[in-house]
């Protein structure tokens, strides 16, 4: 029997399970969408699967369990949500390892026409004309080499356990979250960085900033716009990213003599831990749970703000950072 705090955590987990269910529904049924959105979701799928498996085990629920191979995979996958917890030097090194591998692959596999007119090495995703992902970020999130033929089937096999967890946690009588695939057009465009690409800052710093922008826009544009309902993931995913960007932007400035600003007033480790692990008991009292609130009262506990007011603050901070980056690279 779950106590009130555990029940609130489980309901937040159910929401994440429903989000995963919806992502699959989009893949199978949505129109006007042709992008790498599934790969851009990988870090958050990892947070759900690894967090849910561990949480259910701790509270004694008979949920599906990882085998050793699945455990190793999901530990690595969930770490991708901490991509901006890397130092700037580590992030830059990983980004360009993946970039160089992509460039080498597509250079070596040029068609006859591409040898004449040029080849592509990066794919960028767009939601209603706004860039919201790229293939190099997707490669950074993927524990496997994206260019190995066995990578796709392997990920598919390892994803079965996520489906089992969704089925156990989520009431499958529920419909997927509502999404708008009529008024939103999600597509991609291939580029050659840096010869033929959408940024004017044609340098390594330019591509780093382009990728940061893609990460932010994936949530604040694609997730925010495509999903019609006000779902917890709109705040949760944005907050996890914001939390790590706070220090990352400082390091980026130090290494590049830039002056980007990000307001750190919402950075709270306890809140980050609740989003990453579902455990509310070490942070909240039962009397602080608000079942009428989208996030069960977490923002009120932390900041004295209701969900909508706090989300407005969070998105305002990220939008301000986006504008600074856009002014620099476009």
Image (cartoon, rainbow, N blue to C red):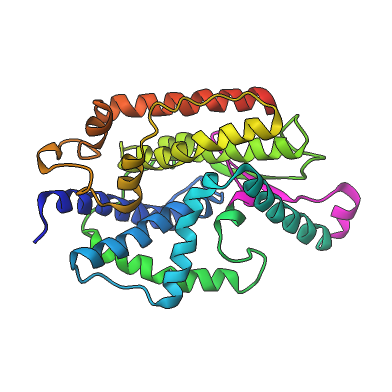
Position above or below: 109 against 255: below
User: Which contiguous range is marked in magenta?
Assistant: 111-137
- Residue 295's image quarter? top left
Q: Residue at x 36, y 36 (%)?
A: 268
Q: Residue at x 25, y 49 (%)?
A: 12
On the image, the x and y values in percent for residue 228 come to 35, 37
Residue 219 appears in the figure:
no
Q: Is residue 192 left or right of residue 18?
A: right
On the image, the x and y values in percent for residue 2 come to 11, 58
Q: Residue at x 74, y 40 (%)?
A: 204
Q: Foreground residue, 178 or 247?
A: 247
Q: Is residue 252 left or right of residue 3?
A: right
Position above or below: 222 against 260: below
Q: Foreground residue, 298 or 29?
A: 298
Residue 104 appears in the figure:
yes
Which image quadrant: the N terminus? bottom left
In the rendered image, residue 116 lying in the magenta stretch gets the answer yes
Q: Residue at x 36, y 50 (%)?
A: 276
Q: Foreground residue, 316 or 192?
A: 316
Which image quadrant: the C terminus? top right
**Residue that sits furthest to the right in the current view:** 116
In the rendered image, residue 85 lying in the magenta stretch gets the answer no
Q: Foreground residue, 142 or 54?
A: 54
On the image, the x and y values in percent for residue 24 come to 40, 57
On the image, the x and y values in percent for residue 126 come to 58, 39
Q: Is residue 176 left or right of residue 149?
A: left
How many discs appear?
0
């Amino acid at each position: 029997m779950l106590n009130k705090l555990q029940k609130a955590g489980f309901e937040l987990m159910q929401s994440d399970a429903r989000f995963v269910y919806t992502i699959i529904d989009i893949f199978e049924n949505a129109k006007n969408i042709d992008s790498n959105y599934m790969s851009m979701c990988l870090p958050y799928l990892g947070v759900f699967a690894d967090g849910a498996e561990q949480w259910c085990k701790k509270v004694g629920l008979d949920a599906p369990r990882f085998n050793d191979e699945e455990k190793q995979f999901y530990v690595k996958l969930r770490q991708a949500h901490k991509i901006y917890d890397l130092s700037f030097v580590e992030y830059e090194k990983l980004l360009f390892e993946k970039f160089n591998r992509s460039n080498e692959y597509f250079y070596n596999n040029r068609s006859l026409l591409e040898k004449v007119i040029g080849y592509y090495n990066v794919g960028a995703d767009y939601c209603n004309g706004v860039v919201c992902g790229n293939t190099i970020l997707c490669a950074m999130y993927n524990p496997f080499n994206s260019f190995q033929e066995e990578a796709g089937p392997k990920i598919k096999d390892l994803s079965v356990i996520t489906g089992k967890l969704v089925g156990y946690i989520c009431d499958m009588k529920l419909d997927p979250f509502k999404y708008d695939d009529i008024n939103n057009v999600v597509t991609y465009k291939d580029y050659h960085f840096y010869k033929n690409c959408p940024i004017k800052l044609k340098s390594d710093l330019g591509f780093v900033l382009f990728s940061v922008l893609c990460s932010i826009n994936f949530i604040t544009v694609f997730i925010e716009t495509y999903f019609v309902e006000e779902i917890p993931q709109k705040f949760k995913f944005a907050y996890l990213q914001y939390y790590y960007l706070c220090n990352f932007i400082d390091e980026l400035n130090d290494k590049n003599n830039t002056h980007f600003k990000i307001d750190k007033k919402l950075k709270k480790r306890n809140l980050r831990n609740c989003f990453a692990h579902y455990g509310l008991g070490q942070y909240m009292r039962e009397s602080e749970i608000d079942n009428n609130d989208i996030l069960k009262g977490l923002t009120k506990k932390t900041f004295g703000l209701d969900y909508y007011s706090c989300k407005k603050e969070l998105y305002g901070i990220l939008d301000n950072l986006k504008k600074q980056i856009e002014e620099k690279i476009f």
